[in-house]
Image (cartoon, rainbow, N blue to C red):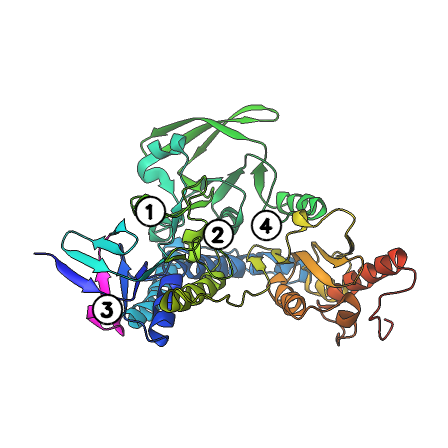
Amino acid sequence: MRKVLDVDVAVLGAGTAGMLAFDAAVKEGARAVLIEAGQYGTTCARVGCMPSKLLIAAADRAHLQQGAVEFGLRYEGLEVDSKQVMARVRRERDRFVGFSLQEIEAIPPEQRLLGKGRFRSNTLLEVGEDCLVKFKAAVIATGSSPFIPEELQVLGDRLLTNDNLFELEELPKSVVVIGLGVIALELGQALHRLGVEVTFVGRNDKLGIFTDPELLEEALKVFAEELKILTHTRVRHVEKQDAQVTLTVDTPTGEQKLQADYVLVATGRHANLAGLGLELCGVGLDSRGVPECNPHTMQCGDSNLFLAGDASGRLPLQHEAADEGRIAGRNAARYPEVREGIRRSPLSIVFSDPQMATVGQRVSCLAPGSFVSGTASFASQGRSRIMGVNKGLIKVYADCRSGQFLAAEILGPQAEHLGHLLAWAHQQGLTIQEMLNMPFYHPVIEEGIRTALGRCRRELLRVLPGGEPTLGILV
């Protein structure tokens, strides 16, 4: 006989978005249940943010020693003990996972279910084989999985993604990385700096997160100085022989054969929505099979279903998942009284070296002629040169009429910190001049922001001869 639960809110997925949605619904006074189809523990802690940064931290330490000769410092030859590197990654990863498991264990057992959830209608879920959940509203927070091109699926145990890379006992001697996005760049560069022979293969030349052609060109130039990157390249044939993989690829200069121990696939992720039975819920689906939802309420159309986190296919970032989970959980508990939640200024960071960051609107979405920009290079920027990290550009963008700061793209040292400063300014709706009126110490890397802002201001004065309405102090 099946167990039947009757709740106000059912939350599918116990990752970051799901846990925050559950917590928000409970705080609104709703009777809620949390349903997880796989392992407890967030993507961030298990296979994403935290283990990748642990690997990058080891790579940064190795690279720092290798670069010391520029300062007249010489060490004995560096030896990478990859077994110890990976043991630390897993040990610390498991510690972070443990924290999320403690949060799960704090939830009363009767409010969490382990099993695959499937919609039978927009008010009924089947969980596993022996449980039915009747609900008034539901939050879909089922996360995402790595997308693996069909031609690469034959690689079996020679195929890596960020879901299984960190389980390696030791680092391989060689890897081909398929993709030029965030995961590809972060993990590929880290492996390279830890002594792995790495080749990147990309279908285009879109490296990282930039949309401004000037930043894209600079990024390719900077990273190509260190890494082997094949752009506009397609995999034509894959062959696996014992512990070796051979890829035949078509490059702009002709056919090449690449041999490696493993292939690391980093070609994006897809929402975990297959088999949920969404077609029985009467919600509109886009071409990817993802429910269409309002990004401010997370509501799918005018239905009682809400979407949050990586499952939304929007911004696969931990802080965005957390915000979406809170909004979705509150609105599911209040349904049909749905309210818009607060969305923060967009901020994306790539923990490569040099780092990348984007703030505010995507530059590719700004209307031509509606904005001006200002650019500064880190090549001669004082503090960056002192530290020997003087690579990259920063570019800021402002509205032509108001002088309001719209966006920034950064390739350079400590972009994770520069990006936060600019994201705060963006969320406050500051103008370029108001930002220039803020304090800048000397000598610091942040002076690069001031240089870019100053050049952007000059462009504003050029298009607005009367000056920006809120110029204030002239800098």
> Which contiguous range is marked in magenta?
105-116
The residue under label 2 is: 194
Horizontal and vertical percent position of residue 256: 52, 26
Q: Which residue is more in the foreground, 453 or 338?
A: 338
Residue under the point 55% across and 34% down: 203
Looking at the image, is mark 2 or mark 3 nearer the viewer?
Answer: 3
Q: Which residue sits at x=39%, y=69%?
A: 334
Tag 3's secondary structure? Answer: helix
Alpha-carbon span between mark 2 and mark 1: 44 Å
Labels 3 and 4: the sequence-earlier one: 3
Q: CA distance from mark 3 to mark 4?
A: 39 Å
Residue 115 on the magenta segment? yes
Q: Is there any visible trace of residue 88 in the rendered image?
A: no
| Structural distance between the alpha carbons of marks 1 and 3 | 23 Å
Amino acid type indicated by mark 3: Gln
Among the two numbered marks 1 and 3 on one chain, the one whose residue lies closer to the N terminus: 3
Hey, what amino acid is under mark 2?
Leu
The residue that label 3 is drawn on is 111
Contact between labelled residues 1 and 4, with CB atoms less than 8 Å apart: no
Residue found at the far left of this picture: 1
Residue 129's place in the image compared with 333, above or below, is above
Which residue is at 57% across, 58% downward? 348
Q: Are marks 2 and 3 in contact (CB under 8 Å)?
A: no
Q: Nearer the viewer, residue 227 or 113?
A: 113
For label 4, the residue is 209
Is residue 58 toward the left or the right of residue 272 in the image?
right
**What amino acid does circle 4 point to?**
Ile
Viewer-nearest of discs 3 and 4: 3
Q: Is 272 situated left or right of 76 in this image?
A: left
Q: Is residue 207 left or right of residue 369?
A: left
Which amino acid, by three-letter code, is at mark 1?
A: Leu
